[in-house]
Image (tube, helix red, strand yellow):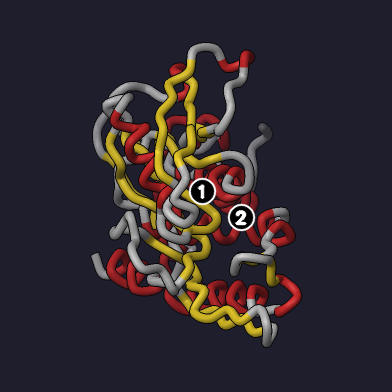
Amino acid sequence: MKKLKRSGRLVDMTYYLLEHPHQLVSLSYFSERYQSAKSSISEDLTIVKEIFESQGIGSLLTIAGASGGVKYVPMVCEEEGTQLVEELCSKLEDKERLLPGGYLYMMDILGSPRLMNEIGRLFAAVFSNQKIDAVMTVAMKGIPLAYAIGSYLDVPVSIVRRDHRVTEGSMVSINYVSGSAKRIQTMSLARRSLEEGANVLIVDDFMKAGGTARGMMDLLKEFNANVVGIGVLVEAEDVEERLVNDYVSIARLEEVNVRQKLVKVVPGNFLKKLNEVNQL
């Protein structure tokens, strides 16, 4: 890269950091990239840090030592988080989304790269202080959400399937009870897709009683893996018995009346969790 003026350096440095969240970048790398002294790079990073934090974009962590550097940690301010949650709730309240059984049509939301990217940053902000090695979800509808979160946490995605795939090699399978349907079902995960002892964030697009999330928790025991947290895009409200208790939800389906074509969606517990993280 040719030598840049300071203004150009700041723009390129900011773009690089935004594209490489949770990655440790050495000062030597930036110094060589911009053909500039480390003292100048440090001054530039101070400016970027101030802007990131003042605008609620995230923070720059500085790690001292020979193997140190800087790391961009995505964050979301309360105002932006509230706006995104309210936007999602408004979209979900469209009565045309109603499906039999009290479910909602959400494929347009899950299929929106922009919206998934924004929601991925919401979850990444809440779990930014956790050590996470992988994001896990069940195929198929949870995949866009899992990849959006994984990109901000800079971790791979492990996809649990309800059927066996020859192309994935040896599989670990368990039977679990569907929380809503009370049926015995099977889920499988390729042995190679997850390291033993990994710290895993479980995500799902919709949770009723939490049977699928509980099944993934049980499956992780077969890998001696640790559940760091559970993230849910939308949770149902009228559930007699929830099979999981500790989770983060963006929106909550408070009322559904198929006969009257009524859908009421309110914010989940995400904003409360975000406020707790931002106060740390």
Q: Which is nearer the eye, 127 or 203? A: 203
* Amino acid identity at mark 2: Asn
Q: Quadrant of the C terminus?
A: bottom left
Q: For the residue labelled by badge 1, is the local secondary structure a helix, a strand or a loop?
A: helix
Disc 2 secondary structure class: helix
Kind of residue at disc 1: Ile
What x and y, as percent, mark residue 191? 44, 18
Q: Which residue is mark 2?
A: 117
Kindly identify which numbered label has been placed on residue 37: none
Residue 173 in which image quadrant: top left
Mark sitting on residue 149: 1
* Drawn side of residue 37 relative to residue 4, left or right: left
Relative side of 96 to 144, left or right: right
Residue 209 place in picture, x, y as percent:
41, 59
| Residue lying at 47% horizontally and 65% vertically, measured from the top left | 235
Question: Who comes first in sequence, dot 1 or dot 2?
Answer: 2
Q: Quadrant of the N terminus?
A: top right
User: In this picture, is 82 found above or below 232?
Assistant: below
Q: Residues within 10 Å of mark 2 (few under 14, many from 20)?
A: some
Residue 139 against residue 142 in the figure, above or below: above
